[in-house]
Amino acid sequence: MKHTVQITIDGKTTDLPVLEATAGLDVVDVRSLISQGVYTYDPGFLSTAACDSTITYIDGDAGILTYCGYPIEQLADHSEHLEVCYLLLHSELPTAAQLHQFKSDITDRMPVDPQFAQIFNGFTQTSHPMSMLCAAVAGLASLFHEGLDIYNPDHRLESAMQLIAKIPTLAAMSYRKSIGATFVDPDPALGYAENFLNMCFGETGRASQVSPTLAHALDKIFILHADHEQNASTSTVRLAGSTEANPYAAIAAGIAALWGPSHGGANEAVLDMLNEIGDLSRVGEYVDKAKDKEDPFKLMGFGHRVYKNFDPRATVMQASCQAVLAEQGVEEEPLLKVASALEKIAREEAYFIDRKLYPNIDFYSGITLKAMGIPTPMYTALFALGRMPGWIAHWSEMLSSPFKIGRPRQLYLGPVKRDYVPMDQR
Ligand code: ACO
């Protein structure tokens, strides 16, 4: 293993250390380059590790995703979302007693202060749930700011538990607001995913009618989304958090970053596309559009920047999706028939096989959420719900050892100094 690389700038050679990863690519430590009078240039961070981390590992070529070393398939098969949350926060799986305590800690923190709930009165009924969720999470900073010491691990854990506990309540409130319905209180007797579904579709004081199959499938969706190392929203949380900002504000920044269709918004885009296609008879036309170089149209839910062989989350999600479709008896629903025709074509046609364009997790999660009766604008809010432990674990990891404020440099290409031109001379 080579432990340094050499770079020669204007005839002067500098040794740059190579930092060894426990798995995956090693990184060249370029921090000393500034003393040589140059920066590195890497828009989009294509070749840049912005931090070190012990939380999540991805090997996109091999289709591997692990949380703290545990393969996602094993976690999805054997654990539940709150167990995964504990793992991400503590780096170890909980004992039965620890999990019991953690669940009770989360349940205790799920209710939202009635005064704070008035924040939703400021929104119109047509507001997108992501807009409400982002604002509500940022608003939590107003409840948890005084006395918060972000360098105290106990305070960080309390913030993490508050956020993991309150995000289902706030997401469900966003949904209830969007349909003009009153809020449903969290029920301490229910599991995490079931509680969320009951707060969306149930009634305060009435026994939960949530199907265990749907609650189980949603819990799995949360596990599969719980972390994905330094993606755009997690990097946003780290960057905002690096200014020592309030954690609720930093997480709200992550929610904003997640909203875009190139990131968390893709599951919503899958359903928009299925709606646009509308009928089996038009599938061929849209597949041709996707293959046409002159047409910018892409099949939403196919392909992935990192996973080039398969998305391990999609494999798990596919099985879960089928269980939900069977339980709901909706296999014959026109949009779902369009989805299965697209999936078949993508698996059989050379264009998709040659380019390794497999259905990704958003394809199956979009269809699953549709079959569950979740309204499309809520899909990204559900992604945010699932991703919460990842965001807060990365924020806490950053604060637990020395770090610097995130402050990229730039390649300046604007005008060099010029003199101000008075208005009458322009
Ligand atoms: N439909 C049709 N053709 C596609 C698609 C698609 N969904 N995705 C890629 N291609 C084609 C490209 O046109 C290109 O063809 P060419 O080699 O003939 O020029 C080739 O496949 C490679 O595509 P790239 O854009 O280079 O692949 P990249 O890795 O940069 O992009 C991405 C990956 C952004 C996910 C892309 O596949 C895409 O836009 N997919 C649809 C959106 C989507 O589902 N996003 C969710 C990703 S998963 C997540 O974020 C959780």
Image: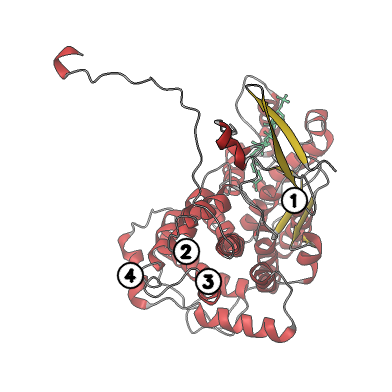
Beta carbon of the mark 1 residue lies under 8 A of ligand 1: no
Percent coordinates x, y for residue 49 in the rendering? 65, 45
Query: Which residue position holds label 2?
Result: 247
Q: Few, some or many C-alpha atoms within 10 Å of disc 4 (few <14, some 14-19, many ≥20)?
A: few
Q: Few, some or many C-alpha atoms within 10 Å of disc 1 (few <14, some 14-19, many ≥20)?
A: some
SS class, disc 4: helix
Which quadrant of the render holds ligand 1? top right
Mark 2–mark 3 distance (CA, rounded to whole Å) = 8 Å
Which of marks 1 and 4 precedes in the sequence?
Answer: 1
Residue 156 numbered tag: 3
Percent coordinates x, y for residue 221 in the rendering? 67, 61
Residue 117 appears in the rendering:
yes
Which of marks 3 and 4 precedes in the sequence?
Answer: 4
User: Which residue lies at the image location 77% right of the left edge and 60% below the top edge?
Assistant: 72
> Which-is-in-front pick, marks 4 and 2?
2
SS class, disc 2: helix
The amino acid sitting under disc 3 is Arg
Q: Nearer the viewer, residue 98 or 123?
A: 98
Q: Residue furthest left?
A: 424
Q: Nearer the viewer, residue 174 or 144?
A: 144
Query: Which residue position holds label 1?
Result: 58
- Answer above or below: position of 216 versus 208: above
Residue 118 numbered tag: 4
- Answer above or below: position of 411 versus 214: above
Mark 4–mark 3 distance (CA, rounded to whole Å) = 26 Å
Which of marks 1 and 3 precedes in the sequence?
Answer: 1
| Residue 193 relative to residue 356: left or right | left
Which of marks 2 and 1 precedes in the sequence?
Answer: 1
Q: Nearer the viewer, residue 420 or 347?
A: 420
